[in-house]
Image (tube, grey):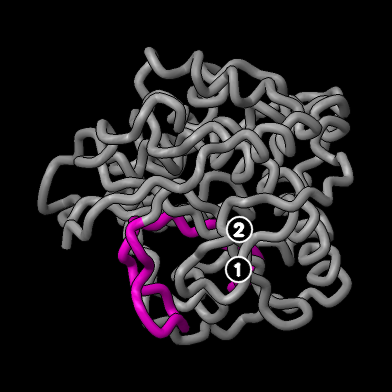
């Protein structure tokens, strides 16, 4: 997957932000509400991990492996999950090309309201459009939790919540995900067109997982059309790559699908994991994603301060 990178992209993403935000301050059972821009926390966690890399050849047990798990590029994996797994112990179901099982160092968990998150005494409440970060012990996993409305409730949100078209995210949520990825992933930034997968070098200790709720039935049992969870994950990944490379969303999605097709042809057993992620972002939504990708990280604190309070939906379970 060839994604040209520019130093300007990294410059825009490394502002030292220490803003306080109202987003997540009323999280019902979340251990730690977000008290600063998550890119700072992601960067700190990555620094600790790189000082003490812990790749292992031993696969650790996991009670909840994400479904349709696959790698977008080396170090960035995606899968379907309701978000009830333990983000500090979940492990990749497959090894890296070097034969190692690299533990996840960063997790972005996209969940619905009323989800019973691991380690919490009870389920979340009905407030949506929230974001908060939790951090494990020193060198542990940095987790960004993003609460979005279920597809059936998307139309209920008032216009002031400014959902990014084609996604379940508000503009602020997508920006926080984008910047969290930017500081977590050691993608090189040069003026050459170099595939990130070949340039990780000593940064193999970094492994990001993004999960979102998915369809109840996956291939080969059913043909997959559009899944909102898949559309959210691919939109977030495309926004991130567009931001760091300054490429159009259309070009980024072409690169992502090209990589999927290479994996699709190389491993027949892998096909059922890749199929649900393909062609999930309609062309009519490209402009909305590009508008978010173009926003500088320095503008994010002001957008957070102007965000409306979390929106409440009734228990739908």
Whole-percent x and y of residue 200? 77, 51
Measured along the vertical axis of the image, is residue 288 above or below residue 305? Answer: above
Confirm or deny contact between disc 1 and disc 2 (CB under 8 A): yes
**In terms of depth relative to the viewer, which is nearer, 217 or 266?**
217
**Residue topped by disc 1:** 104
Task: Answer whether residue 97 is visible to the viewer in this image.
Answer: no
Q: Residue 190 lies in what quarter of the image? A: top right
User: Which residues are drawn in magenta?
Assistant: 100-126
Residue 123 is one of the magenta-drawn residues: yes
Q: How many marks?
A: 2
Main secondary structure type of the part rendered in magenta: loop
At horizontal 58% and vertical 31% (from top left) the residue drawn is 239
Q: Out of 23 and 220, give the one closest to the viewer.
A: 23
Q: Which residue is mark 2?
A: 208
Q: Is residue 267 magenta?
A: no
Element type where label 1 sits in the image: loop
Q: Residue 86's spot in the image, x, y percent?
A: 47, 78
Q: Residues within 10 Å of mark 1 (few under 14, many from 20)?
A: many
Query: From mark 1 to mark 2, how far is it between C-alphas?
Result: 6 Å
Q: Which of the pair 293/248 is nearer the observer? A: 293
Question: Residue 286, image x and y in percent?
Answer: 47, 17
Would residue 297 be seen by someone viewing this image from the given angle? yes
Q: Residue at x 41, y 85 (%)?
A: 121
Name which quarter of the figure residue 85 lies in: bottom left
Chain-order first, disc 1 or disc 2: 1
User: Which numbered tag is attached to residue 278?
Assistant: none
């Amino acid at each position: 997957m060839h994604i040209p990178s520019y130093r300007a992209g990294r410059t825009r993403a490394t502002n030292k932000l220490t803003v306080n935000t109202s987003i997540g301050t009323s999280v019902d059972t979340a251990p730690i509400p977000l008290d600063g821009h998550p890119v700072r926390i992601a960067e700190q966690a990555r620094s600790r991990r790189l000082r003490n890399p812990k790749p292992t050849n031993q696969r650790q047990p996991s009670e909840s492996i994400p479904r349709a798990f696959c790698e977008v590029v080396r170090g960035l994996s995606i899968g379907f999950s309701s978000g009830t797994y333990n983000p500090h112990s979940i492990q990749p179901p497959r090894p890296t090309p070097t034969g190692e099982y690299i533990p996840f160092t960063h997790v972005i968990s996209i969940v619905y309201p009323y989800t019973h998150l691991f380690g919490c005494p009870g389920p979340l409440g009905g407030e949506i459009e929230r974001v908060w970060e939790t951090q494990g012990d020193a060198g542990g996993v940095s987790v960004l939790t993003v609460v979005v409305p279920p597809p059936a409730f998307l139309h209920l949100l008032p216009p002031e919540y400014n959902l990014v078209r084609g996604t379940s995210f508000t503009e602020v949520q997508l920006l926080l995900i984008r910047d969290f990825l930017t500081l977590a992933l050691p993608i090189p930034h040069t003026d050459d067109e170099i595939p990130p997968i070949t340039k990780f070098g000593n940064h193999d200790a970094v492994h990001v997982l993004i999960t979102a709720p998915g369809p109840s039935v996956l291939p080969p049992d059913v043909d997959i059309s559009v899944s909102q969870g898949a559309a959210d994950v691919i939109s977030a990944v495309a926004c991130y790559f567009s931001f760091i490379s300054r490429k159009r969303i259309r070009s980024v999605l072409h690169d992502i699908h090209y990589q999927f097709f290479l994996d699709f042809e190389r491993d027949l057993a892998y096909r059922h994991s890749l199929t649900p992620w393909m062609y999930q972002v309609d062309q009519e939504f490209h402009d909305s994603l590009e508008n978010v990708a173009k926003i500088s990280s320095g503008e994010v604190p002001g957008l957070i301060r102007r965000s409306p309070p979390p929106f409440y939906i009734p228990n739908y379970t």
